[in-house]
Image (cartoon, rainbow, N blue to C red):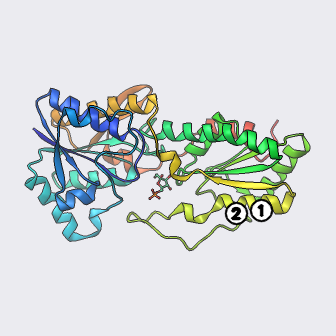
Amino acid sequence: MRIGVLTGGGDAPGLNPAIRAVVLRATQLGHEVVGIADGWAGLIDGRARPLVEKDVAHILDLGGTILGTSRTDPRKDERHQRACIEQVGKLGLDALVAIGGNDTLGVAQWLHGRGVRIVGVPKTVDNDLSATDYCIGFDTAVSVVTEALDRLRTTASSHHRAMVVEAMGRDTGWVAAVGGLAGGADIILVPEIPVTAEEVVEAVRHLKEHGDDDIIVVVSEAVEIEGLDAQTSIERDAFGHPRLDQRAIGASLARHIEERTSIESRVVVLGHLQRGGSPTTNDRFWATRLGVSAVDLVTAGKSGVLPVARGGKVAVVTLSEAVSTTRRLDPELIELIGRLAGTRPQH
Ligand code: F6P
């Protein structure tokens, strides 16, 4: 069997371990592997190269993706739709493994509907794919947030400042919540918990009055804060997602806190630092498990499915189940934020 592998959407630490697992397992089973460059863009153009064991021998600890990636949606253009299907034939592919998040897996599901044998692997630092407990890349991203908070605590404390730390995560608060809790943030703002600017100001004042001299606020990039302006004229990517970094919610919040409380405030936008660097143990481990599993699934003739993490084990779900909804923070985590880093008084 000849298996194509591609990585799509935003890069994430753990993609290379997943590619490695696909190549090692496929080779072991006697398959050939073809690496497709730059996600769906590379499939449209037929840019691909054979991948053998030695190509993946030293990539386990490497961030990014050796295949390259792109945010390309081939469904938007009829010529691209045709090209994708044609290239599967031209490249002689019997099956495809698509490693990606909601967008990439949405395209994979579409290709499955057009008769291409395809299996996904769940990856996104946002950790927002439904049907899986865990997405490759998330653990490394939250480790970056935690480490940043450790570092920011000492400078905030030395200057008696408030630090507003803007985290990625798109429409869900996984990165801000888990990174913020692990790093001991004083206030965590996530899209799942409605909040007003006045509540944030009150919470900061309250912390200050109770002797907190280094106030750390973690804000997720998509949070809507009532009473606070964020930039509204922002670009969108090929999948229609707004460029959330351009909202500059962190900067706006830091300014507001300083104006309303007179506490000197600074913003730190963690941005793509959260997506860079060597993957953590957890990301490598799950990438390896899920990559091997994806190859086993295509070998067994499966299509339109993906291996996921469920209760510490690998389970298999359909692509349509995985992309049908966005997985939001669960109520237990929302409650925990309320208790330890909320803006409303707790009892
Ligand atoms: O989906 C992953 C993600 O990192 C989001 O958290 C963020 O909003 C977006 O991608 C940034 O995308 P880009 O790399 O295109 O700027």
Residue 154, image x, y percentages: 74, 39
At label 2, counting other C-alpha atoms closer than 10 Å, the crowd grade (few under 14, some 14-19, many 20 or more) is: some
Residue 325 pos. (x, y %)? 44, 50
Residue 307 seen in the figure: no
Q: Is residue 141 left or right of residue 251?
A: left
Q: Which of the image's four quarters has the N terminus? A: top left
Any mark on residue 256, and which? 1
Counting from the top left corner in percent of width and height, residue 74 is at 27, 63
The answer to whether any part of residue 17 appears in the image is yes
* Residue drawn at point x = 26 percent, y = 56 percent: 110
In the rendered image, which quarter is residue 281 located in? top left
Which quarter of the figure has residue 212? top right
Q: Using the image, determine if residue 297 lies above or below residue 126.
A: above
Position of the C terminus by quadrant:
top right
Query: Residue at (74%, 65%) from the top-left corner?
Result: 227
At 65% across and 52% down in the image, what residue appears?
A: 268
Ligand 1 is within 8 Å of the C-beta of the residue at disc 2: no
Extreme residue toward the right, this view: 209
In this view, 142 is above or below 110? above
Report how many numbered discs are placed on residues in the image.
Answer: 2
Secondary structure type for disc 1:
helix
- The Cα atoms of the two marked residues, 1 and 2, are separated by 6 Å
Residue type at tag 2? Ser
Mark 1 Cα-neighbour bin, 10 Å: few <14, some 14–19, many ≥20:
some
Tell me the residue at 22%/37% (across/down): 55
Q: Is residue 35 above or below residue 75?
A: above
CB atoms at circles 1 and 2 under 8 Å apart? yes
Q: Which residue is mark 2?
A: 252
Q: Amino acid at mark 1?
A: His
